[in-house]
Image (tube, helix red, strand yellow):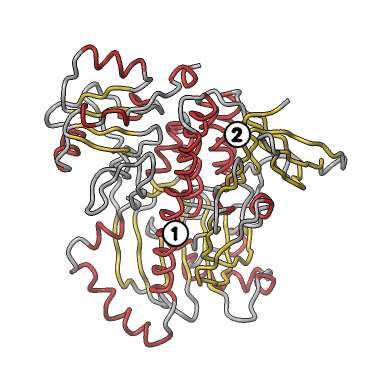
């Protein structure tokens, strides 16, 4: 039997891809080398764009229960004196959710698995090592697997394969893709602590701007905290297995809390890298998440980039499998996602270098310049903004060659007149957002194409959004990205596709 989609890797990216495909009725098999959720904490932050995606999967309340809002960014010197502070309010962002959210990755993976169980469209096969992958001349992919417990070998056939198997991706190697180094390489000690003690610290990220011992502190849960310390040459995590030595690093934040009240969940060294795969697809095999790109953690976009990959590809793949979208639309995945990922990697590199590099001369400059950042008009909003760059032109994004517009950007998940939000109405389909009141025959045609019509009234958030862009109508894709805009529905013309609405509702 040939499975429509096999996903290699049951991390957040692979699980999200399976859940999104399942919403369109696509059966998936997820292969992972671990039997259950990998217990060690890794990623800790995602923004409101990604929170919005989790809510689309029906996991908004579950994520709210495991996450902790981040109240902004504080830049401090080596003595923890505040150089600059950017406070974030408690209000929700343009997508209807907090703009910065801390969490523990095993908790996120657990709720994603629970969502898949409820959906019933995906099977997770644990303790399974993928040992080989080859594409068949007649179409489809053969995956060789080995049971890590019994040693039994097996073959799985798939129409498509999604490689969500991390930085050391076997799938990437199998398609002949390789990582391109974007010139960033730093070794850091990552420390996760659990305690019931009150650290009484400001509820935002603390970034120590010091080239000798750059560090980051953040609260990630009700009783969970993370520190990251840049390691000096020759240092390793093994040198901090002694609790007293490790406690000396975190002591500036833990103050007089006895060391025995701090439970060290993990202390490991990580190399923060900036890399991107030279190609993300070979015929029926795709790379997603860390298999396709590695981002330094300074802007908290690592796990979010992988989930954005899943959101971009899943609906396209579902449409192709259903026969309602041309196979050529799959080319748009790399065209759109690769430049977006590269731009965020470059921003993370820039941020990391500005905060941690440059020696004592740079430290002096930071001491002079950072306290004056608040004088730069609009800088606070820019630093705290969760909005990411627009996607590039593709077969599915009709963006202007020059200038800025709505195409390639996310449609806000705004409140509508009936109290629902845009995503509640669009429901993962194509949607037409318009200021006009279309004729009955137009409404019928949109319904037949599986396109949701969203008419917005004067004064509403989406009304202002369209008018600010000098548009009256926007075609929004199932992933929430604006495909194109026009002055009326007729300007969209044949760009409005047919999409498998019945599969979504099944």
Q: Residue at x 64, y 64 (%)?
A: 268
Q: Is residue 181 left or right of residue 32?
A: left
Counting residues from the start of the chain, the first of labels 1 and 2 encountered is 2
Pick out the residue farthest to the bottom. 361
376 vs 218, nearest the viewer: 376
88 vs 24, nearest the viewer: 24
Residue 373 quadrant: bottom left
Q: Are marks 1 and 2 in contact (CB under 8 Å)?
A: no
The image shows residue 403, relative to residue 324, as above or below, that is below
318 vs 259, nearest the viewer: 318
Report the residue marked by disc 1. 342
Position of residue 40 measured from the top left corner of the image (x, y, whole percent): 64, 52
Residue 74 quadrant: bottom left
Q: Which mark is residue 113?
A: 2
> Total marks drawn?
2
Residue 187 quadrant: bottom right
Q: Residue at x 48, y 70 (%)?
A: 215
Q: Is residue 364 left or right of residue 133?
A: left
Position of residue 504 measured from the top left corner of the image (x, y, whole percent): 47, 22
Pick out the residue farthest to the left. 458
């Amino acid at each position: 039997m040939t499975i429509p989609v096999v996903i290699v890797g049951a991390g957040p990216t692979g699980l999200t891809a399976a859940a999104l495909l399942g919403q369109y009725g696509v059966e998936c098999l997820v292969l992972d080398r671990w039997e259950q959720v990998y217990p060690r904490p890794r990623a800790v932050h995602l923004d409101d764009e990604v929170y919005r995606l989790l809510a689309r999967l029906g996991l908004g309340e579950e994520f709210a229960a495991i996450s902790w809002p981040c109240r902004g960014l504080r830049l401090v010197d080596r003595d923890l004196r505040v150089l600059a502070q950017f406070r974030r309010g408690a209000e929700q962002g343009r997508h209807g959710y907090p703009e910065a959210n801390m969490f523990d990755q095993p908790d996120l993976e657990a709720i994603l698995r629970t969502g898949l169980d409820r959906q019933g469209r995906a099977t997770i096969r644990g303790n399974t090592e993928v040992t080989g992958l080859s594409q068949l001349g007649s179409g489809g992919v053969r995956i060789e697997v080995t049971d890590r417990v019994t040693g039994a070998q097996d073959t799985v056939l798939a129409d498509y394969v999604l490689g969500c198997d991390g930085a050391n991706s076997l799938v990437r190697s199998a398609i002949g893709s390789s990582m391109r180094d974007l010139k960033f390489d730093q070794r850091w000690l990552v420390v996760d602590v659990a305690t019931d003690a009150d650290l009484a610290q400001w509820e935002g990220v603390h970034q120590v701007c010091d080239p000798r011992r750059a560090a980051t502190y953040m609260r990630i849960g009700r009783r969970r905290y993370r520190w990251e310390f840049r390691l000096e040459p020759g240092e390793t995590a093994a040198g901090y297995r002694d609790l007293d030595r490790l406690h000396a690093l975190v002591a500036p934040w833990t103050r007089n809390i006895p060391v025995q009240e701090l439970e060290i969940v993990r202390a490991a060294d990580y190399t923060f890298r900036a890399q991107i795969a030279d190609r993300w697809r070979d015929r029926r095999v795709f790379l997603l998440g860390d298999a396709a790109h590695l981002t330094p953690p300074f802007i908290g976009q690592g796990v979010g980039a992988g989930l954005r990959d899943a959101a971009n590809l899943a609906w396209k793949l579902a449409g192709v499998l259903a026969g309602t979208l041309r196979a050529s639309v799959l080319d748009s995945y790399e065209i759109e996602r690769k430049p977006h990922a590269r731009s965020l990697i470059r921003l993370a590199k820039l941020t990391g270098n500005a905060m941690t590099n440059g020696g004592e001369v740079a430290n002096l400059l930071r001491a002079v310049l950072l306290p004056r950042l608040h004088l730069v008009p609009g800088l606070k909003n820019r630093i705290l903004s969760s909005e990411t760059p627009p996607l590039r032109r593709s077969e599915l994004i009709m963006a202007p060659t020059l200038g800025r517009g709505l195409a390639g950007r996310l449609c806000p998940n705004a409140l509508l007149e009936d109290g629902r939000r845009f995503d509640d109405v669009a429901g993962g389909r194509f949607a037409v957002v318009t200021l006009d009141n279309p004729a009955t025959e137009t409404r019928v045609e949109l319904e037949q194409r599986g396109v949701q019509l969203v008419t917005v009234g004067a004064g509403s958030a989406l009304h202002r959004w369209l008018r600010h862009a000098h548009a009256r109508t926007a075609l929004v894709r199932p992933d929430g990205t604006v495909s194109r805009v026009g002055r009326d529905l007729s300007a969209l013309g044949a760009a409005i596709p047919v999409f498998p609405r019945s599969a979504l509702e099944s």
